[in-house]
Amino acid sequence: MSPHRPKGAPWIAWGAFFGLLFAVYQPALGFGFFSDDLLFSVLARQDSLGLFRGTPALLHYRPLAMSLFWVVQRAAGYDGAIFHFISISLHLLNTALVHAVLRRLGAPPPLARSAALLFGLFPFAHEAVAFLMGSVHSMALFGMLLATALALDRRPRPPWGRTAAALLAYLAAFLSHETGIVWPALLLGIRRLRPGRFPALGRLAALGFALGAGYLLLWRTLPRGDPGVLARPIFTLESSLYAAQGWLYPLGPLLAPLWTAAFGPRPVLLRALRLGDWVFLAGTVELTIEMIRWARPRWAAALGGWMFALGIAPALIFWGPASGMMNYPRLLVIPGVGSALAWGGVLESLRRRGGLARGLAGAALGATLTISLLILVDSMGYYRDATAILRGMAQAAREANGRPILFVNLPYNVGYRWFRPRFYPYYYGGAGAVLVVDDRALAWLVRINGGPDLTDRPAGWVRSVRWEALYPRWFTPAPAVDARALRESLVDHAVYVFREDFTWIPLHRIWQARREGAADAQEERIHRLSPPPQFDSRILLWGWRFEEETRTLVLLWEAAGAPGRRWQVFVHLLDPSGALIGQADGPMAEGLAPTDAWQAGDRIVDRHRLPPGVRPAAFRVGLYDLATGARAPVVQAGAPPADSVLLPGPSTP
């Protein structure tokens, strides 16, 4: 240590770094439960021993991780903050363990620090922290790192208690996630690359292989939902692209523009390898060889590559489809330790050269950490969006007042790049997806995100549909409906339409389908037109009001008969002389209640926000055909035929 450096400086620096890590992931404390978290619907029906016996209802056999969730849920209910605090804590502990393990391996302090920093801000780690069921990867990694720390003993015969503790940590790893089973092979890699340093590793690895083999024999006999089928070769090759990107991630911001320019934009779904993909895979192999040749100490890059290969192999063999693996960044968390170690070795080789190379190493590390930080901060936005969507559903279910619920255009996935642009300087993959929901258990998603318990209601009480006309190419895995079919649901359902500002619009309050004896709260707050003007002989304008706070004109329409034609609404803003000073035209009810789907008796609340800076003396309101421009004729008792009606403007202050 430099004589000019205070003794407490390293602790202050580490404290600042872990404070930064916690600040990055702190938003997760406010996140909800997403699609894979529907496993809570299975856990709620299990006892503590049942999770170890296995059940087909659980997709995988991960009894230790599921038991932890089971205990926390029994103790704290569905409190997302507690679950996500555990996930954040696991990531911080794993970062500290990476540093401790590398120091025990004999890594120079700067290399161990660089690797820990790179792993702590690993840009693909967000899903394992912010997505609750993704934290099983962090649990398995914790077991593997703890087992490794215990195994790295320089004595020829370590105490049996230490060996037993290492094997127990290994057992905890693969009972949290199946990737943990590769740990004995990691020990062999350490034994090969750090010869003579840890003499007991060979014996411990043999015991680990025996324990793992016993687990696999048991695993094959247990009931579970995962059939354990191998991936098709083409899918494995596709997934290798994403894996290679995780290995070379510090170069991503440089490679992505080059690959885009050379080979064009990357399709969302691959399904076939192109020339650029083969070049990328070949280049990854060549770069890896050069990293191992160039890194100092050389064992760091070699061991990092071995750790990465071991960590990613189960995903490549069993996951396969790029549409799956590329949307699951959590699969890169365990391999990410190897990537961090290898790049730490590259930076150490630069640092040892001194002078300009040393400065270059610092600049490269700073740039990589900055870009990773930006990715992680931006990634939190996806989970924040997903939480807003799901908690909005829960709030809607509370307001449904016991009626069946229909969610329209519920987003399937908020991770796609077209959903909300974000900072993602990589070529492959969707940058991390949150699978929000399919239609299998919407009632459970409502419940675990703070809504009422509707899980005991009849099947289909809560369901979703896709209204393609509203949002073309919207990705919702639900049955398609048109406006007429949706109108029939309005008679007895609470219908909520998702809007791109992440709000749920209560369509049943905007489009009030015919219901005998139903009270209309809108009538109490409108200026009635008596008699109401009649448009095209089938549509009545019952009244209007002006909302001063939002500067919105609200019109109340009623269908005297089925219009059978789609009309648009024009709202002309007039000055005291009758001159046009602005417009607030638009589709009926912002497109949510097309007139060609109305039935007699339907009432529609139609809102038109005024442009800023305009205060009209009067409104001219009418209907027109968007295709032809023709206006609907208007008939009102005591007035000559016209094509619009005049309404008074807001009162002058």
Image (tube, helix red, strand yellow):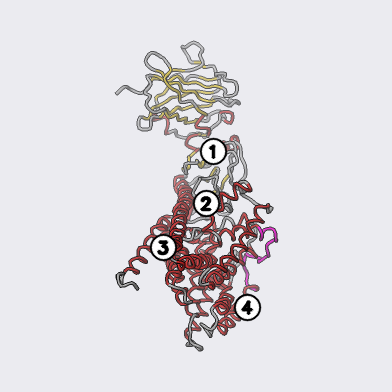
- Secondary structure found at label 1: loop
According to the picture, the residue beneath numbered tag 1 turns out to be: 490
The part of the chain drawn in magenta is 221-237
Can the viewer see residue 273?
A: yes
Callout 3 secondary element: helix
Q: CA distance from mark 2 to mark 3?
A: 28 Å
Vertical arrangement, residue 202 with respect to residue 391, above or below: below
Residue 523 sits in which quadrant?
top left
x then y, percent, for residue 255: 56, 53
Residue 640 lies, with reference to residue 292, above or below; the image says: above
Viewer-closest of 29 and 421: 421
What is the three-letter code of the residue carrying label 3? Answer: Phe
Cα–Cα gap, marks 4 and 3 = 34 Å
Mark positioned earlier in the residue sequence (4 or 1):
4
In space, the residues marked 1 and 3 are separated at their CA atoms by 41 Å
Instruction: Return the x and y of residue 559 as percentages of the image width and height.
Output: 53, 26
For residue 555, which quarter of the picture?
Answer: top left
**In terms of secondary structure, where does tag 2 sit?**
loop
Residue indicated by mark 2: 425
